[in-house]
């Protein structure tokens, strides 16, 4: 799942309490076509009441076109469908919703002896034991789950054994969308938080244990996903195999320390993440493969994931028609006293939208946003890397090489291997264009040595080893 930061990453949030939040979404570069019929349609999953979370006082601007009750999963889907002429803001449209959030740690006390199998006629069993989307149940999934379960017959212990198997065997590596899905990640034994959960959920479902994913945004920074299993009579039980692995194998790492602060996690053993949940998070989606049908708006869509929507979704939950150029759009949460400050929110979002501005060919805004981001976080690898792409596209090859080298020296958490490999690849492109073939090949070989295959990077590096890259690659759609 995406690990881009939320807008406000500096607020200090207590481990248990109440905070006001606003989700901001900006749409820029609005240039209606000749007929002037530009139209924007945005889909978002709203934060909901759930165990450890209560959401109140939702207020919207502008008024929603429709709000869909996804009763199957417990979600509410907001739809904004607006004519550009009704949102005239000098080429910029602004959307937001406010809410009050009460949050607390979840600590379940489960007696395994009391856990029973789910009734096969129940809504939970019917909905959450199926094979669907990235939560597929292949023959390999079923066979692996059977092997992990062994002779165990208690659903609690089966789910716990599957949980610990995922913790012990899946390694963190950010995948592209083509590599996502439980069966693919089981074969690779690699994935991000979404893939850890996909493998766990599919293994549990194949054993007849209802399971689903839960998507959240930290109150301090970033997005995340964990899972839930349904264990009667205790109900939905949280399980986070990604963080359990982090705290089992790298408990004293800088990333683990940051996760402790971000999520409000105490010093815990890995098993704590099965049945318990840290406090500082906002749940924004339950489940996957969300069907959105609205006769009011005239839409029938299905989303693999909403994080919580707009560009942070797959497929994209932002639709535009009647514009001469692709709009640039994105958003994020602001919590606390700055939640209503539009200028602050816009400045923060523009930093995160630098890659989108780059992909749209608006290099000046991409560069200015990245330079502002690097003032705040001078060692941020993502910002240095995209700045390198901007300078590469602008033909400033030596500057681009400097940027990519700064990226490799920078910080990127668990995504560092991906950004490092991409930076080596584009240094190779720059060296090729400058006629420095031997140095270019050295960079492509570093990509091959890394083993990182995000966005078919291995294939692209092999191709460049055979044929020099003599012009900058066009931006890749994301």
Image (spheres, rainbow, N blue to C red):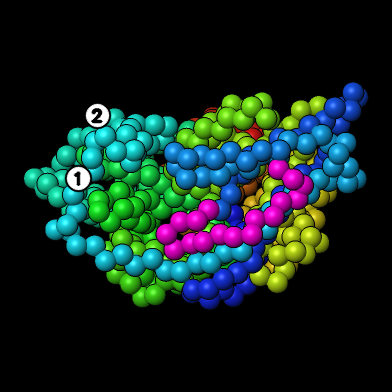
Residue 32 drawn at (x, y percent) = 86, 31
Question: In the structure shown, which secondary structural element does the residue marked by tag 1 occupy?
Answer: loop
Where, by quadrant of the figure, is residue 219 drawn? bottom right
Q: Which residues are magenta?
A: 48-64
Position of residue 245 in the picture relative to residue 282 (left or right): left
Residue 328 drawn at (x, y percent) = 75, 42
Residue at figure coordinates x 38%, y 66% from the top left: 106
Dot 2, crowdedness within 10 Å: few (<14), some or many (≥20)? few
- Of badges 1 and 2, nearer the viewer stands 1
Where, by quadrant of the figure, is residue 84 drawn? top right
Marks 1/2: CA–CA distance: 22 Å
Residue 35 drawn at (x, y percent) = 90, 23
Instruction: Assess whether residue 60 is covered by the magenta stretch.
Output: yes
Q: Earlier in the sequence, mark 1 or mark 2?
A: 1
Residue tagged 1: 117
* 330 or 15, nearer to the observer: 15
Q: Which mark is residue 139?
A: 2
Position of residue 343 in the picture relative to residue 122 (left or right): right
Residue 3 is at least partly visible in this image: no
* 413 or 49, nearer to the observer: 49
């Amino acid at each position: 799942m995406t690990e881009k930061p939320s807008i406000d990453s500096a607020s200090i949030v207590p481990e248990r309490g109440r905070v006001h939040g606003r989700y901001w979404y900006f749409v820029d570069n609005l240039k209606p076509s000749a007929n002037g019929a530009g139209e924007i349609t945005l889909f978002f999953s709203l934060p909901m009441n759930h165990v450890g979370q209560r959401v109140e006082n939702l207020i919207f601007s502008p008024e929603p076109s429709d709000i869909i009750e996804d009763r199957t999963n417990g979600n509410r889907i907001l739809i904004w469908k607006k004519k550009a002429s009704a949102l005239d803001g000098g080429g910029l449209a602004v959307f937001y919703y406010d809410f009050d959030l009460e949050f607390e740690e979840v600590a379940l006390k489960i007696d395994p002896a009391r856990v029973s199998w789910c009734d096969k006629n129940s809504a939970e069993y019917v909905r959450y034991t199926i094979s669907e989307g990235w939560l597929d149940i292949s023959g390999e999934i079923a066979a692996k789950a059977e092997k992990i379960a062994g002779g165990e017959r208690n659903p609690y212990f089966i789910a716990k054994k599957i949980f610990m198997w995922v913790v012990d065997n899946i390694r963190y590596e950010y995948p592209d969308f083509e590599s996502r899905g439980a069966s693919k990640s089981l074969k690779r034994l690699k994935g991000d938080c979404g893939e850890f959960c996909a493998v766990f959920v599919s293994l549990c479902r194949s054993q007849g244990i209802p399971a689903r994913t839960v998507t959240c945004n930290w109150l301090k920074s970033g997005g995340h996903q964990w899972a839930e299993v349904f264990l009667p009579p205790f109900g939905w039980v949280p399980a986070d195999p990604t963080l359990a692995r982090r705290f089992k194998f790298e408990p004293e790492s800088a990333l683990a320390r940051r996760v402790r602060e971000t999520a409000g996690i105490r010093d815990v053993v890995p098993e704590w993440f099965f049945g318990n949940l840290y406090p500082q998070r906002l749940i924004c989606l339950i489940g996957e493969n969300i069907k959105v049908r609205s006769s009011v708006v005239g839409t029938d869509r299905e989303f693999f994931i909403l994080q919580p929507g707009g560009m942070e979704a797959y497929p994209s939950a932002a639709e535009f028609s009647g514009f001469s150029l692709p709009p640039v759009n994105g958003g994020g949460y602001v919590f606390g006293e700055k939640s209503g400050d539009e200028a602050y929110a816009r400045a923060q979002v523009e930093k995160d939208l630098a890659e989108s501005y780059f992909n749209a060919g608006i290099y000046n805004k991409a560069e200015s946003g990245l330079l502002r981001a690097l003032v705040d976080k001078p060692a941020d690898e993502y910002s240095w890397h995209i700045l390198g792409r901007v300078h590469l596209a602008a033909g400033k090859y030596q500057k681009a090489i400097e940027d990519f080298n700064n990226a490799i020296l920078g910080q990127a958490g668990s995504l560092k291997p991906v950004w490092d490999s991409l930076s080596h690849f584009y240094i190779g492109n720059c060296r090729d264009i400058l006629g420095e073939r031997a140095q270019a090949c050295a960079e492509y070989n570093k990509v091959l040595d890394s083993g990182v295959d995000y966005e078919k990077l291995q294939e692209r590096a092999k191709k460049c080893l055979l044929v020099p890259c003599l012009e900058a690659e066009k931006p890749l759609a994301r």
